[in-house]
Image: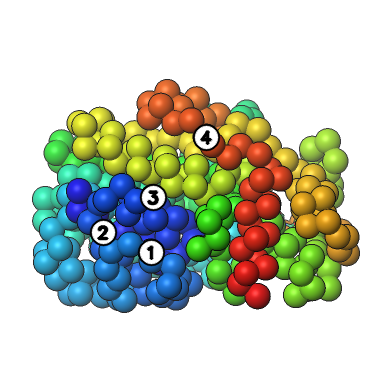
Amino acid sequence: MKILVTGGAGYIGSHVVKALGEQGHTLLTYDNLSTGNKWAVLYGKLVVADLSDETTLRNVIQDFGPDAVMHFAASIVVPESVANPLKYYRNNTVNTLKLLAAVNENNIHNFIFSSTAAVYGTPDKVPVDEDAPLAPINPYGASKAMNETILKDLSLANSDFRYVALRYFNVAGSDPQNRIGQAYKEATHLITRALKTAKGEFDQLQIFGTDYQTPDGTCIRDYIHVDDLAAAHVLSMNYLADGGKSDVLNCGYGHGYSVKEVVNATRKVVGRDFKVHETGRRPGDPAALVADSSKLRKTLSWVPQYDDLEYIIKTAWSWEQRSS
Ligand code: UDP
C-alpha cells in the first residue's frame, strides 16, 4: 500500500515507518522536522513541510495518491500545553482539520490517528476502557479529544471514510537494533529524563508529586514499548484495508508502574545510582492512567512482544548511550 505518514521523522512515527517499511509498503513522510530528524526515516521519501501549509499539503497528497494516511505530527508535552494552549489547538486540532480536509477532497478512505490516554483526564475507573467519558484535564488531551470528535463526525457524514484512533498510554523504549529512538533534545518524559540523569546530563531527576492517591504517592502510568505500539498501527491499517469499521482503541499493556517504581527499575537496568528530588505536582497530571487494552487485543489480534518494564528501559538506555 501507499501510505502518507505525517510526523514520520519523530519518535513514534519513525518506529511505525520502520515497521511499515519492513513489510514493503511505499511510504512518504511529511514532517516539518521541528522535533523529528531526517536520519530517523529509515524507509521511503521525506517531504519537509508544515501541515499548516495547505498548498504544499494538497500538492503532496495529490501527487503521492496514498491509500491510507497515518497522522502522528503533533505537539505532545502536557505541561507545555497548559502554559501554551494555543500552540496545542493550532498544531493538533487546526492542523488535523487541514489534513482531513485534504484527505477528504482526495477521496482517501483510511486514516489512522495518534490519540492519547490524556483524553480521559482522571478516569473514575482504572484500567480505563474506551467507553469512559472523554474529560481531558489539560489542553493537550483536549486538542486530541476534539480531533476524535471531528473524525467521528466525518465518518458519519462520509461512509467511505473509516478511521482508527489509537489512544496511546506512555510510550517508551526504542528500536532493539538501536537505529532510532527518542531523540528530542528537550525530552520531558520520565524514562528519558531518568536515563539522561543517570548519564550525567542532569544533576537530579525531579519526581513531580508524592501526595497522589496511589500506593507510594507518585503517579502511575502504563508504559508501552514503541515497537508494540508500531505493530498496533500496522494491524490497524490492515484492519481498515480489510473493510474494518471505524474504531477507537487503547494502546497499553493493562498494568502500570509508579514514578518511584520506574526510577528503581532504571537504577537497576543502568547499574548505577542517580539523585532524585521530590518536588510538587506538575500541572495537568492525573494520578493514574492504565489501559484496559482488551479491545485492541481482540479487534486486531494484537499480542505484545515487549511487555517488560526493564526491557523497555534497556532499549531506551542503549539508545541514550549511543546518541550521546
Ligand atoms: N515525571 C516525573 N519527573 C520527570 C518527568 C515525569 O516525576 O522528570 C512524572 C510525571 O509527573 C508523570 C509521569 O512521570 O506523573 C509520566 O510523565 P511523562 O511526562 O513521562 O508522560 P505523560 O504521562 O505526561 O504523558
Residue at disc 2, secondary structure: strand
Dot 4 or dot 3: first in sequence order is 3
Residue drawn at (22%, 56%) of the image: 26
Tell me: is circle 4 under 8 Å from ligand 1.
no
Query: x and y percent of residue 106 in the render?
Result: 11, 56
| Alpha-carbon span between mark 3 and mark 2 | 11 Å
Task: Name the kind of residue labelled 1 in the image.
Answer: Leu
Q: Which mark is residue 293?
A: none
- Tag in front: 1 or 4: 1
Label 1–label 4 contact, CB within 8 A: no
Label 4–label 3 contact, CB within 8 A: no
| Alpha-carbon span between mark 4 and mark 3 | 14 Å
- Crowd tier of the residue under label 4, counting other residues whose Cα lies within 10 Å: few below 14, some 14–19, many 20 or above: some
Query: x and y percent of residue 251 in the render?
Result: 50, 39
In this picture the colour scheme is rainbow
| Alpha-carbon span between mark 2 and mark 1 | 10 Å
Q: Look at the image and tell me whether residue 151 can be seen.
A: no
Q: 241 left or right of 190?
A: left
Task: Name the kind of residue labelled 3 in the image.
Answer: Ala
Q: Residue at label 3? A: 19
**Vertical order, 193 against 242 (above or below):** below
- Crowd tier of the residue under label 2, counting other residues whose Cα lies within 10 Å: few below 14, some 14–19, many 20 or above: many
Q: Residue at label 4? A: 304
Task: Name the kind of residue labelled 4 in the image.
Answer: Pro
Q: Which mark is residue 27?
A: 2
Query: x and y percent of residue 155 in the render?
Result: 22, 40
Q: Residue 232: which quarter of the image?
A: top left
Q: Which mark is residue 42?
A: 1
